[in-house]
Image: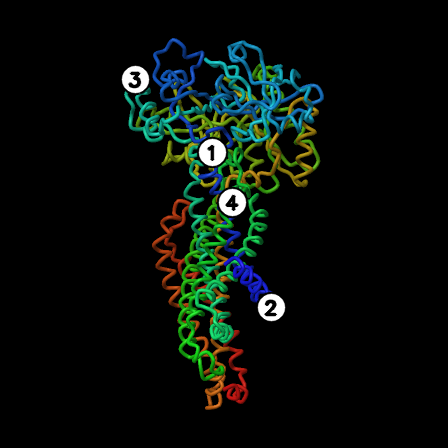
Amino acid sequence: MLQDLVYDLRYAVRQLRAAPRFTIAVVLVLALGIGANTAIFSAIDAAFFRPLPFPQADRLVSIAAVDLPFEASLGRSQQQTRLNDIVADSAVFSRAAAYASGGLNLTGDGIEPARATVTYVTSDFFTTMGRAPSLGRVPVAEEFMTHGPNVVVLSYGMWQGTFGGDKSVIGRKIALNGKSYSAVGVMPADFRFPAATELWVPLALPFGFDIMEAFRNYLPSNVVARLQPGVSVAQARQHADAIRRRFRKIGPDETPADRLVRPLQTTLVGDRRTALLILGASAALLLLIACANVTNLLLARASARQREISVRVVLGATRLRIVRQLTVESLLLALAATAVAVLVAMLAVRGLTATLPQSLAGVAPPEIDGRVLLFALAIAFVTSLVFGIWPALGASRSDLGEVMKLAGAGGGGTRRRTSSARGALVVIEVSLAVMLLIGAGLMVESLRTLLNTDSGVRAEHVITGRLVLPASKFPTVQAKVAFLNAVATRTRSAPGVTTAGVVSALPMEGVGGIGLAIAPDEAYDQAHMQIGLYLMATPGYFATMGTALRGEDLPSTFDSTNKVVVINSTLAKELWPNSDAIGHRIRFGQERRTVIGVVNDIRTKRLDTAAVGQMYLPMAEQPQAYASIVVRGTATNAAMIAHVRDALHSVDPTQPVYALQSMSDVISTSVAPRRTNTVLLTLFGGLAVVLAAVGVYAVLSYGVTQRTREIGVRVALGAQRGDVVQLIVRQGAVLSMIGIVLGLAGAFALSRFVAAMLYEVDPHDVRVFLGAPLLLGIVAVVAMLTPALRATRVDPLTALRED
C-alpha cells in the first residue's frame, strides 16, 4: 500500500504539472477560502480556545461587585463584598487580587518625560496570576502598607525601551507624578496583564486620595481570583452571591448572580463574542463557495479525463485505486493551497487585532502558532475530501462502452449527470454569495450611517493632546489655571494656529464627565430633574472644535458671585422645552448657575452613543488633574503637533504631553472595531461574488465546449447569433435566479444575527436586499456573456466534422 501511495503521489504531481492553469486556479481559489478561515480562526482562537499566558489559566476568574476599602469610608457599616471576604473561605478561592489601570507622568535622570500606563495591584496579584519576574523581585508585604516604601515593577517593554535593557535598573530611582519610586523587578516579555501596562505599583488597602490622580477621580478596580482545584465557576458564583447577601438585600438593578463570577478570558472578550462568531461564520461560507468552485473545476477535469480513466480500468485498475488516485490529487491541491493560505493569514493577522477588545489583544494577541497551523491542515484534509471525493466517485463509475466511443456522439448520459451536478454547485455558490453580500451591505450601510452621524465637531484641521497635572507640581487651583492658560496662549501665538482651547475630556474619548441631577431653579423638584454630565473648558474650546454656540462663551476667570454655565441643546430642551434656556438658572443641590450659552450637542462618549445632557463649567473655577488641549489651524498636522510640544516645553520642559493626534484620528479610533468588521465582511462578500461569477462562467464555458456539435447543427439549420446567445445565457440565468432566491431567503432568516453589529440600520433593509442581488446579477450576466459570445463563433462545418 505504501508503494502504491508513492506511485499515486508521483503520478498526481505529474498530472498537476501538466495542467498548470488548472492547478494555479484551484490553488488560488482554495487559498482564498482557507486563508480567510485561518486568519479569522487566529482571532477566534485567542478569544475562546487558546489559554491565557498564565499557569492553569482555566482557574482564573474575574469577580464583579467587590468593594475596595477607602480611607474616607472607614467606620461606616459594610454594604458590599470586600476583597478579604473573597479569600476568607479558602475552599472556593485560593487567592484573589485587585488591580486598577491608570496613568502617571514618568520622569527621572536621563529619561524623556512621558506618560506611563500604570497598574496599581494588591499584594497577591503576581501570585494569583502565577507569574514571577524575570529580573529582580515583586513587592514584599511592607511595600503594600500605607506609607510604605515606594517601589515599582517594570514591564519588559519599558525595560527595553526606556532603560535599554540595562540589568542594573534594579534599585534605580524614577519619578511618577513627581514622587520617587525604586525599581525592584522586571516582568517577562510575555506578561502583559492588564493590557498595555508599563509599570506595576503596590496598592495599599485601605486606599487614599493620593492615588486618585492616576485615574479620573475614581478607582476603576477589577478583581481576579484563582479557583481551588475541583471548584467550578457555577459553585464560585453561588459562593460570591452568598457573600454579598450577608451585608444587604440585592436589588434588581445590581449585578445579576450569573455575572458575578466569570472566567477571566470571557471577561476580557467582553461584547465582541457575537462579532467574532459572525466573522467566523462568514469565513466558513466563503470556504464553502471556494469548495463548490473547485468541485466544479474537478468535475470538468474528471469529465475531460474519462477516456484516460477508462483505459486504466481496462488495464486492471480497481475502482478503489481510481478513487484513491484522484483523492491524492485533491489532497495535494489542498496542501499547496494551505501553504499559500498560511502566508496570506500571516500578513493579515496584525490587522485582525482590532477585531478583539484591547483588554484581550494586549494580553493574548492573535498569532499564527502551532494550533492555528493544525487548524489550517485540518481544513486542508476536510476540504480535499469535500471537493475531491464527489468527482472521484463519479469518474470511477463511468460506463466503459460509452466513454470509449469517439467524442460527440457518446457520453451524453455522463455529460448530463455532470452538467446537473455542476449546475447545483453554481446554485449553491450564488446563494451563499448573496447571503455574504447582503451581510456586507448591511455592515457598509451601518458604517456609512455612523460616519455620517453628526459628531458635533468639525474634526478637520484640529489637533489634540492630553495632559495630566500632578498635585505635587500643581497643588492649587491657581497653579493649574496659570499653567493651562500659558500653554493655550503660547500655542495660539504659533504660526498657522487659528485658535486653541482646553477641556477636561475630549469628545469620543469615552468620558462624559460626572452626572448630576439638575433642574430649573424656578422648578426645583423631582418632576423636573434631568441628568447632566459636566466638563470643564476654557474660552475658545467651542470655536476650536467648530461647534455652534449661541450666547456667550465661558469666561477665562472665575467669579464666585456670578457662577455661569454653558449647556448643550439636549439639556436645554429637557429643562426648558418651550423657551430659550439662555438667561435661566439651573440648580443642582445648593448650587445655582446662570445659563450664558447653548452649544450644539457633542458626542462625548462614542460616535455610536447618542448625545446626552451636558454642561460646561469654566476651567478657571475647578480645573481637573486631567486636561486635553485642542488646536485648530491652517498649518499641517505635523507642524501643529510640533507647536503644541514647543508651547508646553517653553512653559514646563518636564511636563509630558501624550496622545498627540488629529481629532479625525480620535473619531476613527472610536469606530475602529466597526470599521474592521465591515472591511472583513465586505472583503468576504466581494470575494464571494467573484467566485460565484467564476463558477457561472466555468459551467457555461464547459457547456459550450461540450455542446459544440449541437450549436453547430443549430447554426447550420439557420439559428441566428441572438438565438445562440439566448440559448447559453438562459441556462446561466436560471441557475443564477434560483441561487439568488435561495440566498435572499437565507439572508432574511439569518440577518437578525447581524443586528447586534448594526447602527441605526434595519437588518432587513430593503435597499440592501435589492441592491445585493442586483449587483450579483450584473456580475453574473457579464460572466454569462463571455462563453455565450464564444458560442456564436462556432464554425458549423468544423463542429460537424468532430462527430
Amino acid type at circle 3 is Arg
Residue located 52% across and 47% down the image: 39
**Residue 10 shown left or right of residue 410 in the figure:** right
Query: Mark 3 or mark 4: which is in front?
Result: 4
Q: Is residue 24 visible?
A: no
The residue carrying pointer 2 sits among few (fewer than 14), some (14 to 19) or many (20 or more) residues within 10 Å by Cα, namely few
- Which amino acid, mark 2? Ala
Find residue 167 and report its horizontal and vertical position in percent: 68, 22
**Residue 304 located left or right of residue 651:** left
Mark 4 Cα-neighbour bin, 10 Å: few <14, some 14–19, many ≥20: many
Numbered label attached to residue 372:
4
Instruction: Classify mark 3: helix, strand or loop.
Output: loop
Question: Which residue, given by chain and number where applicable, does mark 1 sit on?
Answer: 598
The amino acid type, in three-letter code, at marker 1 is: Val
Residue 571 location in percent, x, y? 41, 33
Mark 3 touching mark 2, by CB under 8 A? no
Q: Which mark is residue 18?
A: 2
Name the residue carrying label 3.
246
Q: What is the C-alpha distance between the residues marked 3 and 4?
A: 47 Å
Q: Are marks 3 and 4 in contact (CB under 8 Å)?
A: no
CA separation, marks 2 and 4?
32 Å
Which numbered disc flags the more N-terminal residue, 3 or 2?
2
Viewer-closest of 106 and 525: 106
Work out whether mark 2 precedes mark 4 in sequence or the reverse, and give the earlier one. 2
Dots 2, 4 in contact, CB < 8 A: no
* Camera-nearest residue between 261 and 543: 261
Numbered-mark total:
4
- Disc number lying in front (3 or 2): 2
Q: Which of 655 and 480 lies nearest the eye of the viewer?
A: 655
Q: Residue at x 44, y 52 (%)?
A: 282
- Which callout, 4 or 1, points at the residue further toward the start of the chain? 4
Q: Up-down: is 4 above or below 607? A: below
